[in-house]
Image (cartoon, rainbow, N blue to C red):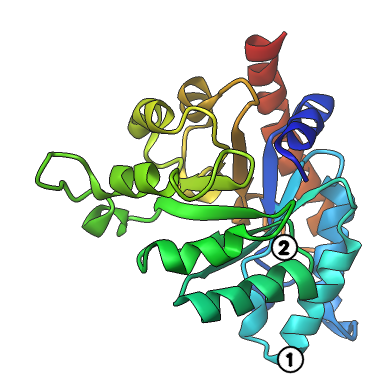
Amino acid sequence: MTREELHQQILSKGSYLCVGLDADYGRIPCHLLKYDDPVYEFNRQVIDATKDLCVAYKPNLAFYEAQGARGWASLQKTLNYIPEEHFTIADAKRGDIGNTSRLYARAFFETMDFDAVTVAPYMGEDSVKPFLGFDGKWVILLALTSNRGSRDFQMDKQENGQPLYEKVMRRAQQWGGPDQLMFVVGATHPEQFEEVRRIAPEHFLLVPGIGAQGGDLQAVSRYGFNDYCGLLVNSSRGIIFAGEGDDFAEQARAAAMEVRGEMAGLLGQRFE
């Protein structure tokens, strides 16, 4: 999917919502356990309930890998079920020496056919560039994450006073342009978005941290929008576990509608 195609999806749906499919087996409603594949059935119903309200889906691989081979099968079936117009992100946080990264990239881009994969930058250029060698595929590089521990290293000031995450973002733009590289920037750091946009004015940002983590969508949007919208704002638990009974899918839809309604208003202010 190109940047322009993603932008058009955002405008046509009035939404830049990404739904995180973090299908925690221990929280799946009990009535789904009768199915041969409860994880897939849970995801299928969430997708049916939210597909007109979001532009992307992001399975976090840990929730599937924990189930072994069965979890990988659930993931593949989920990916196959997601409508083609949606942007799909493998939240894998991979990153290793070059030949290993090439195989990770093949796994997610060729074997499974995701549109994008999250990549950790700590090992540097030769661990990231193999992911950038696939036409039409995207690398989403961890820059400033939404967790509390992000301040341990990512906000650490270098000798020139520049936080480490800024160095990562500046250096990474030498490896890939805004048509193939995005950055993860957490919604729990709204005060940083103005500076993030100065560093990377054209790149899309994947923004976790709204919903259960309490990020401020309005602040993120005010400072994070660019001419392509430039944001994919993720909500996982706040949507998929909005309800945990027989009506969980309806509750997921209601939660997604609330976020999408706010997004439509913000997009209208910026692009109409």
View extreme (bottom): residue: 69
Dot 2 alpha-carbon crowd within 10 angstroms: few under 14, some 14 to 19, many 20 or more: some
Foreground residue among 231 and 37: 231
- The picture places residue 94, in percent across and down from the top left corner, at 52, 71
**Is residue 30 visible to us here?**
no
**Is residue 73 visible to us here?**
yes
Q: Is residue 63 left or right of residue 191?
A: right
Mark 2 or 1, nearer chain start: 1
Q: Is residue 38 left or right of residue 163?
A: right
Foreground residue among 191 and 140: 140
Position of the C terminus by quadrant: top right
Q: Amino acid at mark 1?
A: Ala
Dot 1 alpha-carbon crowd within 10 angstroms: few under 14, some 14 to 19, many 20 or more: few
Foreground residue among 11 and 181: 181
**Position of 75 relative to 57 (above/below):** below
Q: Is residue 167 left or right of residue 111?
A: left
Between the residue at mark 2 and the residue at mark 1, the CA separation in whole angstroms equals: 26 Å
Q: Residue at x 71, y 42 (%)?
A: 255
Mark 2 or 1: in front is: 1
**Position of 271 relative to 89 (above/below):** above
Circle 2 sits in a helix, a strand or a loop, which is it? loop
Q: Which residue is mark 2?
A: 244
Q: Amino acid at mark 2?
A: Glu
Identify the image quadrant of residue 229: top right
Q: Residue at x 40, y 31 (%)?
A: 193
Q: Which residue is mark 1?
A: 69
Q: Residue at x 56, y 47 (%)?
A: 181
